[in-house]
């Protein structure tokens, strides 16, 4: 499984925008699904860019599987996001005005991408996610977030994302300079809650 760069865009055209949000959908979903979340976020003046995964999934197995089992899908997905970041930078928007948001499998991919390419971004929102692999591989993670606001919201428990991995991810990002906030919601289920949206708006899309 490899991914082509198929993107859905909304919001302000990239050439005119001062901020850009990369939105990464979950397993079985579409770029259009995740873009529709933007109506609830304070991103009215952003360029919105959502890549579409081949076969509606970024990688075949659980994000907790050994990374090799999720190849080549995972590396291909990282390459697609990297290409979108390059497009945004070429449009004249600095990394400090690039934002990331994902849900579930897309949240895991979001966290994995930014931690492999840490720098001062505008902000990162992971609705139910953690770093990828049987164990997070610290050798893959480079750079310094330098105070980038990061918000992870997740259900406790969640059927796909163990709270232990959320906490492990929090620690790694914090050690790399992220200004990270984690909120765990008892029995929320595998969804995005109103409180998560409000918290993302307050901490990241402000």
Image (spheres, grey):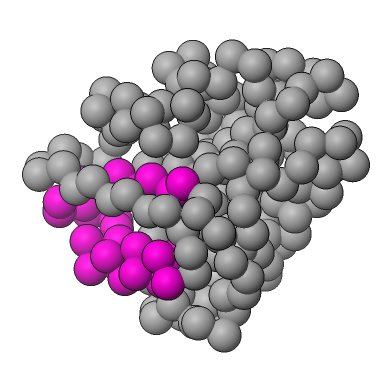
Residue 165 coordinates in the image, percent (x, y): 30, 67
Tell me where residue 175 sits by quadrant: bottom left
Examine the rendered structure and indicate whether residue 75 appears above or below residue 137. Answer: above
How many marks the image carries: the answer is: 0
Q: Residue at x 74, y 34 (%)?
A: 7
Quadrant holding the N terminus: bottom right
Tell me where residue 192 sits by quadrant: top left
Decide which of 86, 202 is in the foreground and name it. 202
The magenta-colored residue range is: 149-175
Q: Is residue 15 visible?
A: yes
Decide which of 179, 156 is in the foreground and name it. 179
Q: Residue at x 55, y 59 (%)?
A: 146
Examine the rendered structure and indicate whether residue 102 appears above or below residue 113. Answer: above
Q: Is residue 143 left or right of residue 193?
A: right
Residue 173 is covered by the magenta coloring: yes
Residue 157 is covered by the magenta coloring: yes
- Direction left: furthest residue: 186
Decide which of 97, 26 is in the foreground and name it. 97
Residue 135 coordinates in the image, percent (x, y): 39, 81
Examine the rendered structure and indicate whether residue 140 appears above or below residue 14. Answer: below
Residue 189 coordinates in the image, percent (x, y): 19, 40
Q: Residue at x 59, y 41 (%)?
A: 122
Q: Residue at x 38, y 53 (%)?
A: 180
Q: Is residue 158 left or right of residue 67?
A: left
- Direction bottom: furthest residue: 139
Q: Is residue 8 left or right of residue 190?
A: right
């Amino acid at each position: 499984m490899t991914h082509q760069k198929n993107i859905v865009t909304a919001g302000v055209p990239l050439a005119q925008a001062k901020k850009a949000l990369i939105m990464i959908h979950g397993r079985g979903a579409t770029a259009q699904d995740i873009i529709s979340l933007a109506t609830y976020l304070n991103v009215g003046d952003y360029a919105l860019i959502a890549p579409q995964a081949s076969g509606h999934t970024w990688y075949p197995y659980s994000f907790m599987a050994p990374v090799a089992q999720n190849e080549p899908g995972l590396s291909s997905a990282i390459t697609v996001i990297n290409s979108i970041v390059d497009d945004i930078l070429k449009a004249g928007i600095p990394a400090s005005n690039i934002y990331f948001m994902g849900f579930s499998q897309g949240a895991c991919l979001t966290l994995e991408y930014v931690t492999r390419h840490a720098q001062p971004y505008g902000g990162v929102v992971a609705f139910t996610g953690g770093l990828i692999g049987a164990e997070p591989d610290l050798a893959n993670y480079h750079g310094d977030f330098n105070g980038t606001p990061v918000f992870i919201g997740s259900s406790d428990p969640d059927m796909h994302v163990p709270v232990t991995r959320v906490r492990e991810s929090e620690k790694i990002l914090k050690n790399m300079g992220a200004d990270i906030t984690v909120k765990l919601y008892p029995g929320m289920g595998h969804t995005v809650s109103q409180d998560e949206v409000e918290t993302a708006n307050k901490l990241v899309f402000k």
